[in-house]
Amino acid sequence: MLFRPSSHLSRGFTLIEAMIVVVILGILLAIALPSFTQMIAKKNTISAAEAVLSAINLARSEAIRSNRNSYMVVDSGTAWCVGVGRTKGTPSSPCSCQPGATTVCDLANYTVADGKRTTLANTGFDAIQFDTVRGFPLSKTSTVLTSNQVITLTSQNNSQMAITVTLNPVGRVKSCGKTAMAGFPACP
């Protein structure tokens, strides 16, 4: 007996099969999208906090290395920026981290465009200078700090994703998150 190919060979998908695949993909996308946006918000907040920590470390090490005071300036809000520079302007206004300013910080600038969808709030962290001997943080008027300087970075998408960076009067930096995030333990 010879085998004859059937004349009813299936060549492709039916409309119902294609619709089922589209519905399944839609359900999977609806499930995955919220966690994906949450992951992006977490990564943006962590990236912004790492940039602030990097700016503090750069300003401190540059002061010790060059034997000249260096400055870290912070502009808060939703259009925030952080800059590190050597002495320019006056001690109360050494440089600006805003793009297009006349005295832009010469060592580093990090703007909100780099830390997408995060907000920066600061307490006492307008312009900090670091001394040349031990890298201690000083106020604008070159006096020793008497209180902690605090920066809080918060995701605009999820307020639970917030990282606090604290610089104490002797220059020790501590960072923690509102909830534990990669590299940032939960704040006590």
Image: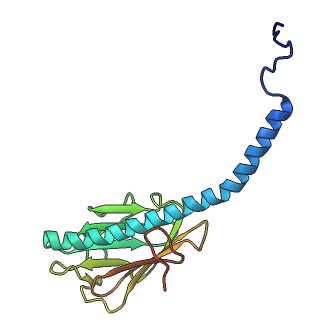
Query: For the view shown, which residue lies furthest in the front direction?
Result: 1
Left or right position of 81 against 93: right
Q: Decide if residue 49 is in sight here.
A: yes
Q: Residue 56: x, y in percent?
A: 31, 72
Q: Is residue 50 above or below residue 132?
A: above
Check the picture and name the quadrant holding the N terminus: top right
Please state which of residues 97 and 148 is positioned toward the viewer in this rendering. Answer: 148
Residue at image point 26% right, 78% down: 129
Please state which of residues 38 and 126 is positioned toward the viewer in this rendering. Answer: 38
Q: Is residue 73 above or below residue 18?
A: below
Q: Quadrant of residue 156 in the image?
A: bottom right
Q: Quadrant of residue 148 in the image?
A: bottom left
Q: Quadrant of residue 13 in the image?
A: top right
Left or right position of 151 against 157: left
Residue at image point 15% right, 80% down: 133
Residue at image point 60% right, 62% down: 38
Q: Is residue 6 above or below residue 38?
A: above
Query: For the view shown, which residue lies furthest in the top direction?
Result: 2
